[in-house]
Structure formats: structure tokens, C-alpha cells
Amino acid sequence: MNREQRWDPERYAKQAGFVADLGQPVLELLAPRPGERILDLGCGDGALTEKLVAGGCQVVAVDASAEQVAAARARGLDAHVADGHALGFDSEFDAVFSNAALHWMKRPRDVIAGVRRALRPGGRFVAEFGGHGCVAAIQTALLRALSDRGVDGQAHHPWYFPTDDDYRSELEAEGLKVETIALIPRPTALPTCMRDWLEIFAGPFMAELPDGERPGFLAEVCEMLRPALCDSHGRWTADYVRLRFAARVP
Ligand code: BEZ
């Protein structure tokens, strides 16, 4: 996970609750059965973990953010701070599940190797995250506004958005058998506005900007994006593309 990204669980729940709300398709792909032991990788505040527990699963949840883990624990969940690149589990889960988290983990081979070790023989890895082209307009506007200020945005780029072919290769290289994998364009209506989205998700891009420059920077990025992502009623959409897959230990 990216060390420059900070999470505020209260704000996240209010302004980014849609991330878990839109997790239903990947939950359906997981098809959890009561009694299964499941690792939720990148659990955030535990909104989806809670659904797995309600369905009768035994769930261990991990996230790199201590703040999000505290929020998940406040729901009564078995949540722990852990780096997804260095999972320490050994053949103990029927499934590893992940929603909207893997794009924050930029070394996929390390992540998948840890997932593979965590799974029992026959266990499955089912996940959804940002795929190739995700928030392309937003990334372009951020990089442009940084470059205009003499900052190399790529040096702070926090996200990994692979193609389906590339991620299939990563999964297969760690010995997983891919059952299904697809890129799914999913333009996503934002509950408030682009500025709120940027403040929640795009913090790492602003690492080099002095605090006093950030409001002007954010306003400029929003104006660049307005023609493409804001309608005539002021409603903003984020240009999300998801990568959804199920893979299994043979
Ligand atoms: C997400 O939570 O799905 C997301 C976060 C940052 C960039 C793109 C997607």
C-alpha cells in the first residue's frame, strides 16, 4: 500500500461508501458459503467484511491503514494491520477476497505469492480492482497540473491498473488457474463532487505541493475535468474501469 495515502474512515464512509455498495458483483462471484474461512485483503472500514460474516463465514480482514482497521474493529471484525505485499498466512483460507484494494499494491507478484501461500489446495482468489484505463482522465489531469508546476507526478503515482492479459500472466506465474477475468468499464456517479474524490483518493499526487498550493491545484484539476466528467446539472462521474477475476489453486 502507498505510504503517502491517508484514510479518514468517517469521511470515507460518508463520501466513498459507494465503493463497498458497488461491491455486490464481486461478492456474487466469490459466492461465499457458511463456514468458509476467508481472508479479506484490503478490507478498508470492513463494510463488505461485515457482509461475509453475516453470511456465516469466518473472516480475517487485513488492511495497510491503521485508521481503517480501527474502523473495521469497531464493527466487531477480526481486522489487522498488514502490508498486502508481505502476507504471512500459510495454507489456511478457503478463499482470499479483495474489493477496490489491489490497485494500491504496486508489486502484484509479491501480493499474489502471499495470496497463493495463504490458500488451501483448491482455494480461490476472487477480487475486483481498478483495471487498465481506470480514471484515465483524472490521472491525465493530475499529471498535467503537476507538470505545469514542475513536479514529476509519476514519481508519486500510487495506482496499478493492469490489463486483463497482464494480470492473468501475473496470476499464472504464481501457479493460479484463472477461471474468469474481465475488464469492465463502470463510469461511477460521485455522491458529492470531484474535489471530494480527489481529496480522498489522490493525496499521494500532492505529496510535493506545499499545503497553501493545494486548493488552487485541486480547483485547476477539477476545471480540466469538468467538460468530460461533469454534466449540466453539476453531477460528477468518475471514469472507473474495473478488473474482476476468479482464480484457483489447482
Ligand atoms: C477505487 O477505490 O476503486 C479507486 C481508487 C482510486 C483510483 C481508482 C479507483
Image (cartoon, rainbow, N blue to C red):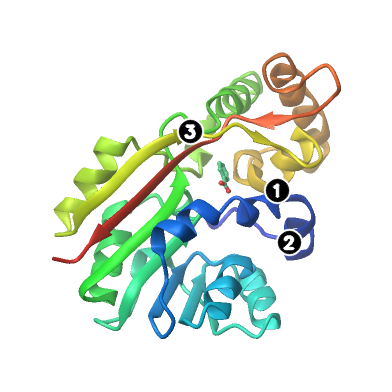
Answer with the quarter of the image where residue 209 lies: top right
Q: Residue at the location (32% across, 62% down)?
A: 125
Q: Is residue 76 left or right of residue 175?
A: right
Q: Secondary structure at mark 3?
A: helix
Q: Find disc 2 in the rendering and name its residue.
A: 8
**What is the crowding at mark 1: few (fewer than 14 residues within 10 Å), some, or many (at least 20)?**
some
Q: Earlier in the sequence, mark 2 or mark 3?
A: 2
Q: Residue furthest top?
A: 227
Residue that badge 1 annotates: 200
Residue 100 seen by the camera: no
Q: Are marks 1 and 2 in contact (CB under 8 Å)?
A: yes
Q: Nearer the N terminus, badge 1 or badge 2? A: 2
* Residue 131 in view here: yes
Give, as a three-letter code, the residue at label 2: Asp
What residue is pinned by disc 3? 154
Mark 3 packing: few (<14 Cα in 10 Å), some, or many (20+)?
few
Horizontal and vertical percent for residue 102?
43, 53
Mark 3 vs mark 1, CA separation in Å: 19 Å
- Residue depth check, mark 2 versus mark 3: number of the one nearer the observer: 2
Please, what secondary structure does the residue beneath circle 2 have? loop
In space, the residues marked 2 and 3 are separated at their CA atoms by: 24 Å
Q: Quadrant of residue 221?
A: top right
Mark before the other along the chain sequence, 3 or 1: 3
- For the C terminus, the image quarter is bottom left
